[in-house]
Image (cartoon, grey):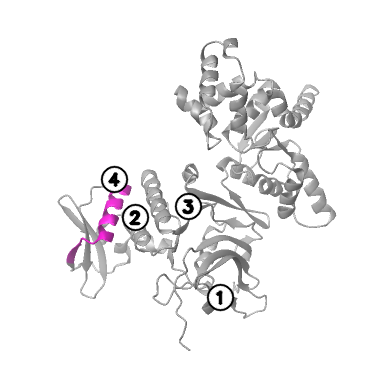
Amino acid sequence: MPRRTETTFKGQILHSIKIDKLKCINNINTINFFPNPITAILGPNGSGKSTILHAIACIYKPDEDNNGEDHKLVDFFPRSPDAEWNGSSFSVCLSYRKAGQLINNEVKEYGKANERGSRWTQIYARRPVRAVYYLGIDKCVPIIESEKKNNFIYDTTILSDDLSRIILKKASYVLNKRYETLNDHQLPNGRRLIGVSLGNVRYSSLSMSAGEQKVFLILNTIFSAKKNALIIIEEIDLLLHEAALKKLIQVINERARVKNLQIIFTTHRESVINMSNILNVRHIVNIEERSYCFDETKPDAINRLTGDRVSPIEIYVEDDVAASIVSKICSSLKATKYIKIIRYGAAINVFTLLSAELLKNRNVENMIYVLDGDTFIDEAVKRERLNKVLTGTDDQAISLRSTAESKITQFNLPAGYTPEKYIHTMISSLNENDFDGDLSELIEAARSIQYEEEDHNYINGLFESLGINRETGLVRIIDLAVKAQEWTDFIAPVYEKIKPIVDSLNESIVNR
């Protein structure tokens, strides 16, 4: 029987990774890598970002044509007198096609038994096939720093193939330089270096800046990779200025979508959060003996989780629209000075964030967690989510879940509505003749927007129509929505959570 030929599967995707124990990561909730093809992993030093990349790099093996690199867990987690890595365990969920058959959401377990001297599993030969490329920090070290010579001779060839032309074009865009040629320099020992010409100047990678060298390395990897490849980049922001990083991510995103690439990188640059329309943003935080992953969250929420309370009352919301609504509620209670509003991003983060506070034994009496009210609506659904992060059947676990349930509230929305769509509806229902000037203009602008496929555009469209910035526009919109008869019912659940805490705080201040 002929030996079966293995090739890279089509339609490959790594959906998620769940790490029970690996290096500094303990019992982290599932890290998802969708809906976008690119995932940015953020977190403080020592939080486990690199550990996650190392684990992912070892999931697959190259095909028989050696497309990709063959990384093994023992390479990243070598045995030593201080580290056997026994008891390490993680699992991944992935999908692929093999011999025309769709293998969907398959879970594979990796790890090392507790016994001393045990081996890592899975068996390396049984790993699924995929082209994987790992760009570690070591590959960003300037070439000149690793050279011992001080004199070089090489033959130069100007590269004119399609790949070289596209790399040159994209590098010019990312680095804002008008490169004219991409060159190949061959040393007498057979080693090759890249080079470029810029105006009357020609130089090799020996003379490139570290950031410049890194951009060419990443672009070459991205544009050389075959379809469905997985590319892992450690600290993508290292040595790059802000504008270059943003452009590089844009270029990577375009290529990833054309070639079905999956790209996962770590970064310390929180500005990537502003690119969450094309990136999956994941924050990794270690608290006490547990690790947490937050989806699409905001820096304030993470900073609060790892720092000290600065305001008597803290209210957590999904986004700036919810923050503006809550701010208006607090203003009506004359409580603005007591309250800090913190945005946590995606709705699912509320369960992890609240659970982390409780597990740290923090006092959550004056904390309120607000959902928009368009997802996780039913109490049973909220309870199910809390059960996943606050596990256990003992009295303490039951008590913590009960406390958590009492801290979550939401706006009162009609079925099928988001806050943006409902606020637009409220404003449109007002009579513009009852208002003067800019408020009347705002009502007319709202009525001109009849239908939007994306609910956020019911609000964004008003900003564009009136030519006002978002911060100013939200204040005006909420000030007007308050006039609608539906407003009181809309905010009621949140108002009823905030008012008793404010009243109690006012009473304690009066009695001092």
Which corner quadrant of the image does residue 19 belong to?
bottom right
- Neighbor class of circle 3 (other Cα within 10 Å; few <14, some 14-19, many 20+) is some
Q: Earlier in the sequence, mark 4 or mark 3?
A: 4
- Residue depicted at x 61% and y 38%: 318
Cα gap from disc 4 to disc 3, whole angstroms: 22 Å
Cα gap from disc 3 to disc 1, whole angstroms: 28 Å
Q: Which residue is mark 4?
A: 176
Q: Residue 121, position in %: x, y?
A: 59, 75
Q: Amino acid at mark 3?
A: Thr
Q: Which residue is mark 3?
A: 267
Vertical placement of residue 472 versus 299, above or below: above
Cα gap from disc 2 to disc 3, whole angstroms: 15 Å
Q: Amino acid at mark 1?
A: Arg
Vertical placement of residue 123 versus 76, above or below: below
Q: Earlier in the sequence, mark 3 or mark 1?
A: 1
Q: Earlier in the sequence, mark 4 or mark 2?
A: 4
- Residue depicted at x 36% and y 62%: 221
Cα gap from disc 4 to disc 2, whole angstroms: 12 Å
Q: Which residue is mark 1?
A: 79
